[in-house]
Amino acid sequence: MSLGLPSRLPGTPSIGALIRGETPTFSFEFFPPKTAEGERLLWQAIRELESLRPSFVSITYGAGGTTRDTTVAVTERVATETTLLPMAHLTAVNHSVAELRNVIGRLAGAGIRNVLAVRGDPPGDPMGEWVQHPEGVLYAEDLVRLVREAGDFSVGVAAFPYKHPRSADVESDTRNFVRKCRAGADFAITQMFFDADEYLRLRDRVAAVGCDTPIVPGVMPVTRMATIERSGQLTGAPFPPALLRRFEALAGDDEAVRKLGIEVCSEMCARLLDEGVPGIHFITLNRSTATREVWQQLAPSQVAAAA
Ligand code: FAD
């Protein structure tokens, strides 16, 4: 079924095509703000990062569908008021298929043609019971189909280097990942991770079952000890023990923790680029400084070009 949306707007690039291009993409992820101060910080970060000329930026969709309007509004504003190419995240939590179609239609109406289709987590507790909306979809795979059927979108999905915390084992996790690629995903972006080998293992097991969907690593530098705790909640995996010891030795010295975080993130990104990753996606938490610092370590020529 098609919503009868126009085909891709002239001049709106497909992120899937960019990621399959010859040079790695660099992209930044933001979340929709909840307060006026949050909005100020978001737009400050967007303006500061715009000069780095990222390949695209993405705007998350609040847990439980709570930011439906702000996600659409921020993504639309990025499209109309900046030089950036935006991608909207979309989740299935608490939405009927009719509501999802409505959001997809609004995105298309705003000229957004790139969507990251993720299932979403229940609000509050990411590991809480996932309850399907009575008229909604069950898995990201179904959401991918819905977006695809709605018009000429480039669709991305989530990937999990440590496996998704709800998956019983890496085999079923890989199988289910490949299902959403075959349902029409053009590319994937990973959950954050702190050991390049975890990403490489994911890439190998997906390739081993004959799936060539490009998987972009999602990275976030540790800037505070709290980042380490948060990563455990999101990934369901322990932080790499040897690296944890290096951070723990500095706990109490905020500046030293931050400096080490930038250093190890830059080293990991450099290794990933050497390994031929299709791009790097930075989770910015709506701040520009840490991302900018890692970027400067990685891409001096691009920084010079953007200056
Ligand atoms: P799915 O692919 O549906 O997988 C969920 C679980 O179900 C997995 O264990 C999987 O193995 C299993 N599964 C999948 N298909 C089947 C099947 N056919 N049969 C049996 N089991 C199956 N959350 C938000 O709320 N907003 C966001 O904006 C957001 N952005 C994200 C961006 C990235 C890059 C990533 C990595 C995650 C993001 N998330 C976001 C979090 C994401 O919504 C959660 O991790 C969610 O729990 C899983 O989403 P998914 O799309 O991978 O789900």
Image (cartoon, rainbow, N blue to C red):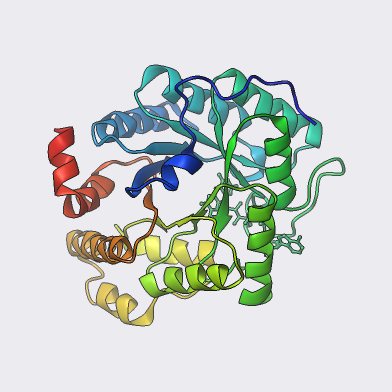
Residue at (31% x, 34% y) in the render: 45
Left or right: 44, with 102 as reference point? left
Q: What residue is rendered at 43% in x and 66% in y? A: 229
Q: Residue shown at 62%/31% (left/top)? A: 68
Locate the C terminus by quadrant.
Answer: top left
Q: Quadrant of residue 18?
A: top left
Kindly tell me whether residue 275 is visible in this rendering.
yes
In this view, the residue farthest toward the right is 134
- Of residues 106 and 271, the one nearer the viewer is 271
Please tell me in which quadrant of the rendered image residue 179 appears: bottom right
- For the residue pair 277 and 120, the one nearer the viewer reads as 277
Quarter of the rendering containing residue 166? bottom right
Marker count (numbered)? 0
Residue 148 screen position, x and y as percent: 68, 37
Q: In which of the image's four quarters is ligand 1 placed? A: bottom right
Q: Would you say 46 lies left or right of 74 here?
A: left
Which residue does the image show at 34% across and 24% down from the upper left?
A: 83
Q: Is residue 127 visible?
A: no
Residue 24 lies, in percent from the top left, at 34, 50
Residue 66, given in percent of the width and then of the height, sits at: 63, 37
Looking at the rendered image, the quarter that the N terminus falls into is: top right
Where 122 sits versus 3, above or below? Answer: below
Image position of 4 with respect to 88: above or below: above
Q: Position of residue 30 (x, y in %)?
A: 43, 39
Q: Nearer the viewer, residue 216 or 136?
A: 216
**Above/below status of 150 relative to 243:** above
Q: Is residue 100 left or right of residue 247?
A: right
